[in-house]
Amino acid sequence: MRILKRLSFSLLVVLLVVLVIATIAEKIYGTSYAFQYIYNSPVFVSLWIALALSALTYLIKRKIFRKPVTMLLHLSFLVILAGALFTHIYSTEGTIHLRKGDSKGMFIDSDGMGHKMPFSISFDRFQINYHTGSHLPSDYHSRVVITDEKESIDGDISMNNILKYRGYRFYQAGFDEDEEGVTLMVKHDPVGIAITYIGYSLLFISMLLFLFSSRTKFRTLIKKMQMNRALLILLFFISNPFSSFSKESAKFLPEETTAKFDNINVMYNGRIAPLQTLMQDFMLKIYGSTYYQGHTSEEVFTGIMFFPDSWKGEKIIKVGDNRIRSILNIDGSYASINDLFDKDGNNKLDALDYNKISNDAKLVRAIDEISEKYSLAFMAMEGELFRVVPVREDKEIEWVSPKQISLGNDSLKIGEWLDVAKKSISEKRFSQVDSLISELRHYQSSVSGVSLPSEAKIKSELLYNRLRNHTPISITLIVIGVISFIYFGMLLLDMSKVKRVVVYLLNAILLCTFLYTTLLIALRWFIGGHIPVSNGFETMLFMSWSVTVLTLSLQRKFGIVLPFGLILSGFTLLVSTLGETNPQITYLVPVLSSPLLSIHVVVIMISYSLLAFMMLNGVMAFLIKCFSKECEMQIERLQIFSNILLYPALFLLAAGIFIGAIWANISWGSYWGWDPKEVWALITMLIYSLALHQESLPLFRNKMFFHLFTIIAFLSVLFTYFGVNFILGGMHSYA
């Protein structure tokens, strides 16, 4: 039995190493290399088979059937692997291209081989649905007809809506430019998918039984810590940089007039939004902050648009690369419009020899970035970003800048709107500007009608824009969390020594954080029309919310989670603001318009939150060990707490992974594609699964080793989220 145990866990470790190597190889040599030499290789498949057989034999020797819930849990993974093996051996997939009126009975695989189907499929028509008032697609629909010897049926294929017939599955993959033809993905895997889905079902059932059955180790730990049932259910469900003024002071509109521009509708980022949103994103893009020397984004943007000459000398363009600063001959991190040109009026960037710098990818990116910022500044000065005029062409509505048209009506020559507004401003007739804005909004309503956002959405977005900068809040949470973390550690986790006022204060701060993040999530949800979990900012925001919910729920039994919750909530909020800060609210691309996406992300984010609590438990254990000799009881209590968190954390991670697999199979025909994010999520799950096998691996029963493991293992979580996003890339990358 000892040999079987060593063989099984050794194979698991080898598999982990191979998976890590595979993601690195894919980054260096490309996806086709990784699939040819690793993922699709006989050696890799044999490694999985050897691990499954050795684990099964070991479980039988251990008489695991005496623990039916544990047996069912392990059996589910074996069934999932069996389904994957059948898919690998027997499934066929490829594409079929159909023009209108075509009828084909064969599809082509990736090697160019033809595969005959026992029926034919023909293409009838194709349609693109758009989001209201936008040119962004909300869905793609293909109408097809399937004909065989027995019957002829009509079928609709769209994103997240596949067509199934006689074991074949058809997915929307592409369409021709003239919309008279489509490309469908075809998958024939009647055995593998069925077995895999049985495995998924067994997995979900076994995880529920494990958490709620009275004879599992998890419930034993719960009883040991005297936790209540409500907590068990919850565990499952659940600085603005400033630069100096230029010599020629920039000009601004009066505050009252500036405020009137906020809720003008503008076509921005594929949707109709308040102009305030564009103005704030404009400042974040070129300056890195929504404030410039105490002035708001709205004041700066309208100032640039109506007083362009006064802004050409202002240092409003952030320059992050030292070499670009040298090229522009500037001191500090900010440049003006004038800094782009030499004394003869020539663009300094145009003088660069691109043949010499083409191999310097970092410098090329820096040049592209600064060029984009200058382009945006020029477009703001020329009014090109001011796409506030809806123009109806047949049934379509195009939003353009006033300078792009020459239309008019009885009360307002809309094509001359900017010129009239500039003249009124220059003559300080600001009441007339207010009237012009009212007339523009009336014109928008008369042309666009129901495609405009509701007044409630406009007000919600304006409120969201006022709340969006949470960097000061996140830093405050981290500082308070670290101070309380040290305070609790000095008291050796003895909650009787913690002053009640401290507990009340920390709870109040967390409650305010919960309300704040809840409001942000609700506003983004209402404005965007979908649950906000589709990018890095939104997932970090949701994780911060999850941390506050878990902390407020756990703190009565485990006071130590109070500083943990503050630190994690602050850290996740801070991370969400990195890069281009708060990303724009956008419509989801059609393939992401699935409730399974929301469930997939939410479940995994809660899992990461629980694993983060375990990591901080480990840090606290080592701090207590360093500063106190009589600390065994506290360290053991922390270990028990981490063990309790481990089960729901790992089960939620597994559930999230396999829910994502189901979504992928429904959306694009493959439940597992060895994408780097998928692989690293699997790596993380396998790493943490080692800690569940404490009977077979007694080293994990050692308190300090277990705490050290929770700290080191969390590195895999960090790499799964950040490393894949910013280093490995792939389909799931948020970078």
Image (cartoon, rainbow, N blue to C red):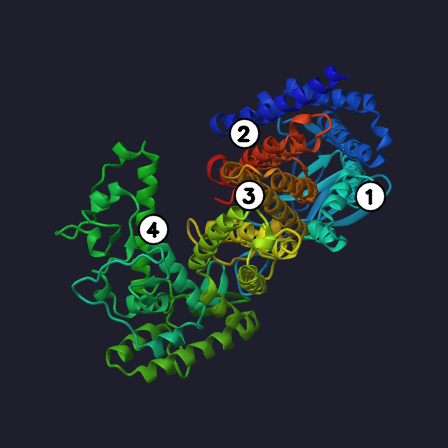
For the residues labelled 2 and 1, say whether their Cβ atoms are less than 8 Å apart.
Answer: no
Q: Nearer the viewer, residue 657 or 366?
A: 657
> Which of pointers 3 and 1 indicates the residue nearer the eye?
3
**Residue at left 30%, top 49%?**
371
According to the picture, the residue beneath numbered tag 1 turns out to be 213
Q: Position of residue 601 (x, y in %)?
A: 62, 48
Q: Position of residue 666 (x, y in %)?
A: 70, 44
Left or right side of 461 for 707: right
Q: Which mark is residue 616?
A: 3
Q: Nearer the viewer, residue 9 or 314?
A: 9
**Image x and y of residue 415, in percent:** 36, 72
How far is mark 2 from mark 1, CA to CA? 38 Å
Q: Nearer the viewer, residue 200 or 337?
A: 200
Counting from the top left corner in percent of width and height, residue 49 is at 72, 21
Kindly report the distance in space between the C-alpha atoms of the residues bearing marks 3 and 1: 28 Å
In three-dimensional space, the C-alpha distance between marks 3 and 4, rounded to whole angstroms, equals: 42 Å
- Nearer the camera: disc 4 or disc 2: 2
First in sequence, mark 2 or 1: give its number: 2
Q: Secondary structure at mark 2?
A: helix
Closest to the camera, between mark 4 and mark 1, is 1
Q: Amino acid at mark 3?
A: Leu
On the question of residue 333 being in view, the answer is yes
Mark 4 or mark 3, which is nearer the start of the sequence?
Answer: 4
